[in-house]
Image (spheres, helix red, strand yellow):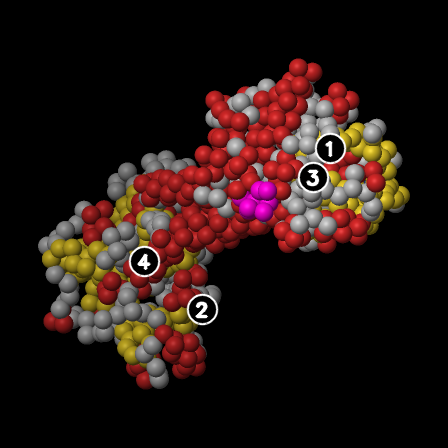
Amino acid sequence: MFTTYLRRELVHRRKHSLIIAIGMALAIALVVVVNAVSAGVSAAQSTALASVYGVGTDITVTQAAEPGEGGGGPGGFSFGADEGTTAEDGTTTLEQTQLSTARGITSFDAADLDTVLAVDGVEDATATLSLESTSFSGEIPDFGQTPTEGSTGGMPAPPSGGADGAGGSSFGVDSFSVEGIDLGGAALGPLSSVELADGRTFESTDGGADVAVLDASYAESAELAVGDVIEVGGAELEIIGTVASTSADAATASDVYLPLDTAQTLADLDGQVTTVYVQATGSDAVDAVQADLEGALPEATVSTQSDLASSVSGSLGTASDLVASLGTWLSIIVLLAAFLIAILFTISGVTRRTREFGTLKAIGWSNRRIVGQVAGESVVQSLLGGAIGIAVGLVAVLVINLAAPSLSTTSTGGDAAAGGAPGGTAEGMAGGMGGGPGFGQQATTVAADVTLNAPVTVGILAIAVGLAVIGGVLAGAIGGWRAARLRPAEALRSVA
Amino acid sequence: MARGAAAARRGAAQRRLNRAGAGPRCPPGPRAGPPPAARPPPGPARASISTATVETVERPTKGAYTLAGVGRAYQQKGRTVHALSKVDLEIRSGDMVAVQGPTGGGKSTLLQLLGALDRPSTGTIALGGELLSQLGDARLGAIRGREIGFVFQHFNLIPTLTALENVETALVPLGVSAEERRSRASEALESVGLGERGGHLPSELSGGQQQRVAIARAIVKRPAVLLADEPTGNLDEETRDEIMNLLEGLWRDQGLTLVIVTHDSAVARRAQRRLHIKQGSVREVA
Ligand SMILES: Nc1ncnc2c1ncn2[C@@H]1O[C@H](COP(=O)(O)OP(=O)(O)OP(=O)(O)O)[C@@H](O)[C@H]1O
Ligand SMILES: [Mg+2]
């Protein structure tokens, strides 16, 4: 009788049941989507971090450029009147290349690596030199004014064309990131999370040699391949291999990798490094190591992985924030609303059925049976809503995954996250002035593109079903309590 | 729905009593107390039963009521309304009693007390030797489920359940198997002449048919008592006679105690006993 009665009520009071179910479905779908996306975003975040900092890195040590000191970062290009070649028609052709540390960070003595290694709780460490290679080339017709004004001013110079009003002028800015890798170093750092795409990677005999390994996606966009030659800091280096991130979605930390000493020589930074990658003996040692390192290297910025994660910005950072705050609150609010709807509708249903329950009590139905009937109805309605919600949520997650939005991630700022490799994505460069000379105060230090893949786990589904059951039981308990409280004599007098 | 089936459930001793008292036109013999008018109130009621055979003392008569000093007062906006006061009443098993009176007189209140739906404010009510006025809600519910059938003016069928399922609801508290529930319910529907309509929803039935379903629901559990509050109040004259014939037939065949509240003197005249309730006082109409 329980199931017959329940079925009949659900079928005959379809509208009532549907409202409860739809409210619950909406809430459950939202919970599923928010959960999946949030799991996806945090997976993307760790992918991004791993691709940038390498696997196994707990702490990075960097040093911020002193403001005003001009240290680090390519300074503005300056062209003297005698520079460039001036053609007979007055057009000046300019070409200049710079190789220097990314803006916002500065290099420091490689001997600091030994200081780091001497700290208690440090399992291993390796140092790298992160550089930015920027080349500028352009043609400027002679307008009787010094051409420097157009280019040293920072932002305004467009990559090409005459938008600056100087009709007929044309500029090209090319920029890529360069990472000097310690060949004898530990299995840490940027190259620990890459796999070989082509050619070979560095061997210890490559020290000081003019060889380079390229990020596979950069090589593709720059139309370079193994065996080709790339110009870095005025030297021609042979490309011996290309590497790709082990997580297929992310770019590697840098566009070009060189042996550390080669990079130091080319950048005129002998014995200098920009980043030390530190692995602690265990995750519980990280905080202590961080404190000790800060003590040992007072000038340095010491960042843990969790500092780094919080510094991840760009659309990935935005997504993460959005999911964490808005998504969670929205699910909670919608869930509460759904519970409220279920409760109010169940109560109104019981009120409408006062005489029905009075009659059932009159023919001897126990309170327990009537409460069970009311609770059963609302649990089934909520479960129905939960099932619809899971289906809708799964479809939504599927759509998200099919669309596979690519989240760009950049760790910015001269402080906590300044330790990564410099350089924007190739995309960023193609965009124009992103990494060019005089590009404002923002130092782009880490960049990667990560595809969002929102996973749906059994756990999420269990939570969804659990929430539906809780909503149903809650509504059923309250509605059932109202039904149980009815005095049969009075319920029968009710004129509903 | 043979009378034997009902009696079988009540046990051998009971069967004998039922047989003896079943016929409406042969008022109770050996176990009967003095005629209603002369009946002494509360305690004596028990005494009068004890004058019967030993068996009846051990197994008090099903479907027999004893009311002593029963009053029921309601609080209405701070005012106390005495819906019933000082009612002393004896209803024998197998009696057919019509209750009449002006509106607001307390007829429904009396029926709810007899039906174990409510407890009196004062006085005692015993049904078949059990003191209803002292029992808890759960015990009263169990007694309603087992002993008492209700028929209401507005039929009170569950609108979402079919006729057959509505009849089945009465067997739910008795814990009979689904199969037996089904077969007994269709048997009951058959006995009210609706064997073919079991699959219909109440909304698909006429008023008279709905009331037949309600009567089937009331009698399917073979109760000792059938209480009907204006069962024909919502029906036209022709249907009214139909329903009355049905109720009277069931009463005669099954030997149950039947109490009918009615405004209709034509209905009341068919009863064996007539009570008149006015302003909470009960008077026997000769
Ligand atoms: N739950 C209640 N609360 C307050 N007063 C009540 C309640 N139930 C009944 N009454 C009052 O008790 C009195 C008797 O009511 P009852 O329903 O028994 O009358 P009735 O004889 O059945 O009338 P009718 O013929 O109209 O059905 C009325 O005055 C009524 O207002
Ligand atoms: Mg009434």
Tell me: residue A183, above or below residue A90. below
Judging by the rendered image, the residue that carries numbered circle 2 is: A66
Disc marking residue B97:
1
The residue shown at (39%, 40%) is: A391
Front disc: 4 or 2: 4
Q: Quadrant of residue B112?
A: top right
Residue extending furthest toward the top: B238
Amino acid type, residue under disc 2 in the picture: Glu
Work out how far the residue at label 4 is from the one at label 2, CA to CA, in angstroms.
31 Å
Q: Quadrant of residue B274?
A: top right
Amino acid type, residue under disc 1 in the picture: Val
The subunit carrying tag 4 is A
Judging by the rendered image, the residue that carries numbered circle 3 is: B29
Sequence-wise first label, 4 or 2: 4
Q: Which residues are magenta?
A: B9-16
Q: SS class of the residue under badge 3?
A: loop
